[in-house]
Image (cartoon, rainbow, N blue to C red):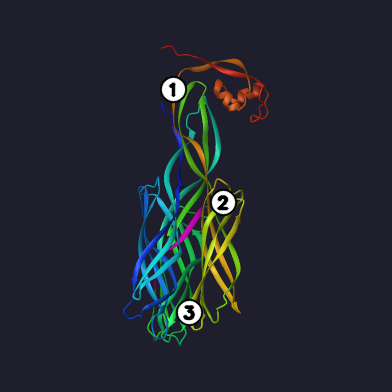
């Protein structure tokens, strides 16, 4: 006979696979007919957009593009500085064991570096080395037995268990647009370099909705028609709403802004402005904290009980931590004779170690300095060591972590061939802690008699014994054993201790 039970449903959203790989996107770029030949490459940079991703059995497909900006020294009479803009479209297949269609994936893709070489004056080969970090999450509905409707002659061992259960997820597309004015004396000839960061992210939860606010910080370096170089900066608000049913202030909410497309183009010469349009996908995942009365064990005084148990991995803790790490370095450039046009910094984590209450990171920050050297643009690439510790009592050795580092601000002071650089890095750390839990799925009971007589047994406590284990062994009760032996604290018994066990004796039903 199957016992009637009460059950509670949870949704397990847990990492079933993590992978980090280096992939290369390569293409040949043809110089436009209206541009001069390439004599030397000065700088190559890019901005990644993710068009689409698809989770399939055993793999993930990512479709995206790299808006590439190549600055070169032209092979012309003036040895002028020119640029090429191109988009390197790519499709990457990431193999992940246990990945299934319908699961959710999250990607963190950074450009580690570019390798650019001249094939001939009209053709350039570009390789972008990408670091692709991928997490895959399973969403599994699990029903847990939390109560039994008929508890006659049943002994039940319960405990409260904290569980982080997935409440829901959703996404929304945001179009952030702006027209940025440039100097009245400037007519834009070419866009030379673009940096994009999404910063100052804030989240607010209202009735069945998640409101997200951030800024897309965009830095643009451009060439004017009279061969001057200038820069503009813009902060475009990125605001969106995601509907998630039953979300409230007590929920845990994870929000990510993913750049899907970027359009930057000069307006007409009369307008003296640049048009910017960023398509951003707002992705939100919400979790609720549940306290579940889990049945750890049970038995009957009069019947044989068969409990169908299953071991599951539950999420018990989930936290988002943020910090700002500031680096200060002095870089000596003896041939720096003029203006510094642009400084960009790309942080890369090579390894990390999780210890009690902290994570230790090691890596590097790849810094590129574009400067004027004898009226010609030059570049200097410097690799700075990155060593950082994130400290928190929420970090433990069993945690699964995901870290994202972005460059929030780069400042420089130039004096006598020295560049004093200050780089502010935003550290975002997601922590997930899981534990194994034995849960009861259903219960079958076989009536084999009734209990109306008792006997007494003497038992000596062995290592590993608890009153519950002893009571279950003899089909007695913790309460009865404690009363007979005058035990005040049922959680304290000693090895070798003599116990009197009141034991049920069944009268078998004749067939």
Provide the residue span drawn in magenta. Answer: 251-263
Mark pair 2, 1: CA separation: 52 Å
Looking at the picture, how far across and down is residue 207, in whole percent? 47, 57
User: What secondary structure prevails in the magenta region?
Assistant: strand
Residue 254 among those drawn in magenta: yes
Q: Depth check: 3 or 251 in front?
A: 251
Residue in view at x 58 percent, y 24 percent: 470
**Residue 76 sits in quarter:** bottom left
**Comes first in the chain, label 3 or label 1:** 3
Q: Which mark is residue 119?
A: none
Asked whether disc 2 touches disc 1, contact meaning CB atoms under 8 Å apart, the reply is no
Q: Is residue 222 above or below residue 168?
A: below
Q: Secondary structure at mark 2?
A: strand
The vertical placement of 382 against 414, above or below, is above
What residue would you read off at disc 3? 377
Observer-nearest residue: 188 or 10?
Answer: 188
- What is the CA distance from the residue labelled 3 to the residue labelled 1? 87 Å
Q: Is residue 201 visible?
A: no
Which residue in the structure is indicated by mark 1? 446
Q: Nearer the viewer, mark 2 or mark 3?
A: 3
Q: Which residue is mark 2?
A: 353
Where disc 3 sits, the SS reads strand
Ranked by sequence position, the earlier of labels 2 and 3 is 2
Give the left or right position of residue 66, taking residue 462 as reference: left
């Amino acid at each position: 006979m199957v016992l009637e039970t009460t059950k509670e449903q949870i949704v397990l959203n847990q990492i079933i696979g993590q992978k980090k790989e280096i992939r290369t996107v390569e293409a040949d770029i043809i110089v436009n007919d209206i541009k001069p030949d390439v004599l030397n490459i000065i700088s190559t940079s890019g901005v990644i957009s993710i068009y689409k991703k698809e989770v399939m059995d055993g793999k993930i497909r990512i479709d995206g593009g790299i808006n590439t900006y190549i600055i070169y020294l032209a092979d012309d009479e003036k040895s002028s500085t020119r640029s090429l803009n191109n988009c390197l479209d790519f499709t990457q297949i990431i193999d992940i064991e246990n990945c299934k269609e319908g699961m959710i994936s999250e990607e963190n893709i950074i450009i580690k570096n570019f390798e650019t070489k001249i094939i001939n004056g009209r053709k350039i080969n570009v390789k972008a080395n990408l670091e692709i970090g991928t997490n895959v999450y399973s969403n599994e509905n699990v029903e847990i037995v939390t109560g039994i409707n008929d508890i006659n002659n049943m002994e039940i061992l319960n405990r409260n268990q904290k569980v982080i259960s997935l409440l829901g997820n959703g996404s929304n597309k945001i179009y952030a647009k702006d027209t940025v004015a440039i100097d009245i004396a400037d007519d834009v000839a070419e866009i030379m370099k673009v940096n994009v960061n999404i910063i100052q992210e804030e989240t607010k939860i209202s009735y069945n909705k998640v409101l997200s606010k951030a800024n897309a910080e965009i830095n643009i370096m451009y060439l004017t028609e009279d061969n001057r170089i200038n820069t503009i900066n813009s902060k475009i608000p990125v605001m969106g709403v995601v509907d998630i049913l039953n979300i409230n202030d007590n929920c845990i909410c994870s929000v990510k802004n993913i750049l899907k497309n970027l359009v930057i183009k000069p307006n007409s010469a009369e307008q003296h402005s640049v048009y910017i349009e960023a398509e951003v996908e707002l992705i939100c995942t919400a979790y609720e904290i549940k306290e579940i009365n889990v049945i750890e064990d049970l038995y009957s005084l009069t019947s044989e009980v068969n409990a169908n148990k299953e071991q599951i991995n539950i999420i018990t803790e989930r936290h988002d931590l943020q910090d700002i790490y500031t680096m200060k370095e002095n870089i000596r450039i003896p041939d720096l004779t003029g203006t510094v046009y642009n400084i960009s910094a790309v942080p890369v984590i090579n390894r990390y170690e999780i210890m009690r209450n902290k994570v230790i990171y090691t890596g590097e920050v790849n810094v590129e300095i574009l400067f004027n050297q004898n009226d010609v643009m030059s570049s200097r690439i410097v690799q700075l060591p990155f060593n950082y510790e994130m400290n928190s009592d929420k970090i433990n050795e069993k945690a699964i972590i995901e870290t994202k580092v972005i460059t929030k601000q780069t400042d420089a002071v130039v004096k006598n061939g020295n560049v004093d650089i200050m780089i502010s890095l935003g550290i975002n750390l997601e922590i997930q802690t899981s534990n194994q839990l034995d849960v009861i799925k259903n219960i079958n009971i076989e009536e084999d008699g009734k209990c109306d007589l008792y006997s007494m047994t003497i038992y000596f406590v062995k290592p590993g014994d608890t009153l519950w284990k002893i009571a279950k062994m003899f089909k007695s009760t913790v309460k009865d054993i404690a009363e007979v032996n005058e035990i005040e604290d049922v959680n304290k018994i000693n090895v070798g201790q003599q116990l009197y066990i009141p034991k049920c004796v069944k009268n078998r039903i004749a067939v």
